[in-house]
Image: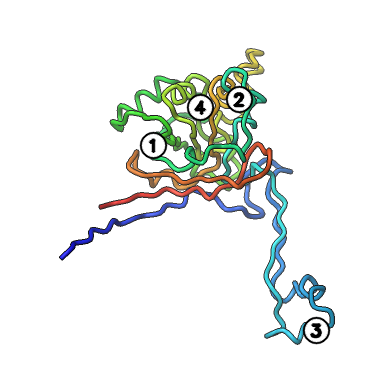
Amino acid sequence: MTNLKTSKRTLIDLSIYLENDVISDPPGARPEINYLNHQDSFSTLEPFFPGLQKDDMPDGEAWAIETVKLSTHSGTHLDAPYHFHSTMNEGERSITIDEVPLEWCLQDGVKLDFRHFADGYVVTAEDVENELKRIDYELKPLDIVVINTSAGKQYGNDNYMSTGCGMGLESTMYLLERGVRLTGTDGWSWDAPFVHTKEKYAETGDASLIWEGHKAGRQIGYCHLEKLHNLEVLPPSGFMISCFPHKIRAASAGWTRAVAIITED
């Protein structure tokens, strides 16, 4: 008799909603969703069937349908190297979202807990190294590394886009030099919130501080997820992340339903 051993699999949704009236982006950049219910949508069905009357349909209902106005950076999304700069890997043409290797998007996940850092703090390579030591994990190529910041719990609040730390050039390069090609954050941006960088730029006039984590892609091409959710419930490691982006021709980003997969024997 053969004994079949089955594994228990837990799925954790790492994505925020696409929804109206929730602060997820700056004014003018938020999603706009128009809902048509079964009663309101008859005018969109009738042209397919000339002579059809609303009362001919069961309960007078047509279909539910929505129209959506979005940026490719709305909701939980995956940024392609093209978003960061026109070139990557020291001069190559940056790949767009439809060119991102699929194998980058389904890999072992690693969570770095940076919730204790102050708003606007720029994470250093030493910070990353110390956190990896704390969780007793050694990075391997193609690991998906996500950072849990204090912004995650502020999603939808007025201060969401000004909360949390961000990844700097050296901390991003620390990951990329070890073979990581896809990262993520529960903040609005992989970098520190702009309101804090704005103050530093005003004091120093140093433009290299602007988007420094993103601009690491000029040296080594990579992707990152932004506006993740539920990172606080993840263990430091021992899970996979699936984050295949929508296939938008020649675009800088694509929406994704990011999911963590935990398998227990």
Q: Amino acid at mark 4?
A: Met
- Disc ID at residue 179: none
Q: Relative to 228, is 7 above or below?
A: below
Q: Position of residue 156 (x, y in %)?
A: 58, 48
Looking at the rendering, which quadrant does residue 86 occupy? top right
Q: Earlier in the sequence, mark 4 or mark 1?
A: 1
Q: Position of residue 222 (x, y in %)?
A: 53, 30
Badge count: 4
Marks 3 and 2, Cα distance to the nearest angstrom? 56 Å
Q: Amino acid at mark 2?
A: Trp
Q: Which mark is nearer the camera, 4 or 3? A: 3
Label 4: which residue?
167
Marks 4 and 3, Cα distance to the nearest angstrom? 58 Å
Q: Earlier in the sequence, mark 1 or mark 3?
A: 3
Classed neighbour count for the residue bearing mark 2: other residues with Cα under 10 Å, few (<14), some (14–19), many (≥20):
many
Q: Earlier in the sequence, mark 2 or mark 1?
A: 1
Label 1: which residue?
110
Classed neighbour count for the residue bearing mark 1: other residues with Cα under 10 Å, few (<14), some (14–19), many (≥20):
many
Q: What residue is drawn where x is 40% and y is 23%?
A: 127
Marks 4 and 2, Cα distance to the nearest angstrom? 9 Å
Label 3: which residue?
53
Q: What residue is drawn where x is 69% and y is 62%?
A: 66
Q: Tell me: 35 left or right of 14.
A: right
Q: Earlier in the sequence, mark 4 or mark 2?
A: 4
36 or 245: which is nearer to us?
245
- Disc ID at residue 211: 2
